Image (spheres, rainbow, N blue to C red):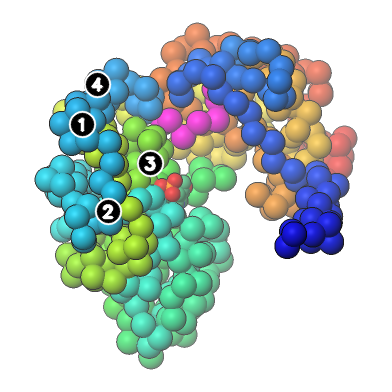
Amino acid sequence: MSFSDKVRTVYQEQIKSIRDAGIFKQERFIHSSQAADIEVEFPAGSSLKKVINMCANNYLGLSSHPDVVKAAHEGLDSRGYGMSSVRFICGTQDIHRELEKKVTEFLGTEDTILFPSCMDANAGVFEAVLTKDDVMISDRLVHASIIDGIRLCSAVHDTFKHSNMEHLEKKLQLHADKRLKLVITDGVFSMDGDTAKLDEMVALCEKYDAMILVDDSHASGFIGKTGRGTHEKCGVMGKIDIITTTFGKALGGASGGCVSGRKELVEMCRQKARPYLFSNTIAPVVVSGVLKVLSILSGSTERRDKLEANTAYWRKGLTEAGFVLKAGDTPIVPVMLFNAKLSQDVSRDLYDEGIYAIGFFFPVVANGQARIRTQVSAGHETHHLDKALEAFIKVGKKYDILGKTKQEIIEKYGL
Ligand SMILES: *Cc1c(COP(=O)(O)O)cnc(C)c1O
């Protein structure tokens, strides 16, 4: 046997050290569809509990929307279940191209190419458009998938301090000799919910003749007046050279992603991006679902407006109750607890009160920055948010953190 006891021990020890460090991830099994109200089995083997979901990326409440489900059924019936091919061999249907056109229109770009996921879009895009004569300058808090994509590209890599425009400018000056320069950022940063300063970044890119890439996974569909994304919010539509985004969050939540932007860059991805060339195409059923999502969002801003109102309501409630929040205006609302164990205790007690919200701590966020990251959805009704608020207040009282400052919480619980 090749998987000998000695080999097994190597892995058992690694798994044990993950447990000992207190960072072992345990899955919770949801027995219902994704929505504001879900039924959860946790811990494994326990009976089902009805809880309110406060931590899904289901920002627009479209993951189980009847019209989207119906469109997916129609796609399944008319185009079949799978393509059994990558796009360039025999994996492109008319609806794949139609979706690329619709995404282009929605984002206000020149062209779009679909990828199996946004992780894959980020894994493929840099290598497809840059060479060793070029430089990538990324914000220090970009998503893990961008970090992986950067690793796969031969261009020089440098970073700038999070959202620090002076530092970015210094780096643009430092790399003035490179053939091409690409500035890279998330549109909305997933852990803090803050928005990149795209207007200032675009101005710097124009000044130093650099391109800009924005990963808008936590923005597409709901940020900006008509939900186009952070480029709309920051007034720079048409000025972002590359947008990568996912269909796995607000845009229906199934799966899939894309690179959208300048047509030459999209064409380079079609010719060279490896996750596009060597991984299966998005399933027709998902393509049909995303097409329906885009048609819903193009016809009305009702859902993103409701999300905005819900977010304001939720932030106001938590603030008045006396919690310490990360400032911001996106539906990512982090309730700061600073201490890792406290974040786990609060999360567990919230669950007992029927609220599903996960506590994050190092290494997912910086040391001493533990939090409950709540995420608001257009699928929440006022009664959901009121019940969640009631539970937060009850648990907040138990741990005596209401009305306490960051310093007071840290003094009480340590870091
Ligand atoms: C979720 C996320 C991704 C990955 O999206 P998938 O389509 O699920 O692979 C990429 N980038 C950012 C910023 C994300 O938040």
**Circle 1 crowding by C-alpha within 10 Å: few under 14, some 14–19, many from 20:** many
**Residue 101 on image: x %, y %:** 14, 48
Residue that badge 3 annotates = 255
- Whether residue 182 sits left or right of residue 68 in the image: it is right
* Disc 2 versus disc 3: nearer the observer: 2
Residue 75 marker? 1
Residue drawn at (73%, 62%) of the image: 2
- Marks 1 and 4, how far apart at CA: 9 Å
Residue receiving disc 4: 70
Question: Mark 1 or mark 4: which comes first in sequence?
Answer: 4
Q: Is residue 57 magenta?
A: yes
Residue 61 locus on image (x, y percent)? 38, 24
Q: Of the two numbered discs 1 and 2 on the same chain, state the one appearing first in sequence.
A: 1
Badge 1 amino acid: Gly
- Magenta range: 53-59
- Which kind of residue does numbered mark 2 sit on? Ser
What is the CA distance from the residue labelled 1 to the residue labelled 2?
A: 17 Å
Q: Amino acid at mark 3?
A: Ser
For the residue pair 220 and 313, the one nearer the viewer reads as 220
What residue is shown with label 2? 85
Viewer-side label of 4, 2? 2
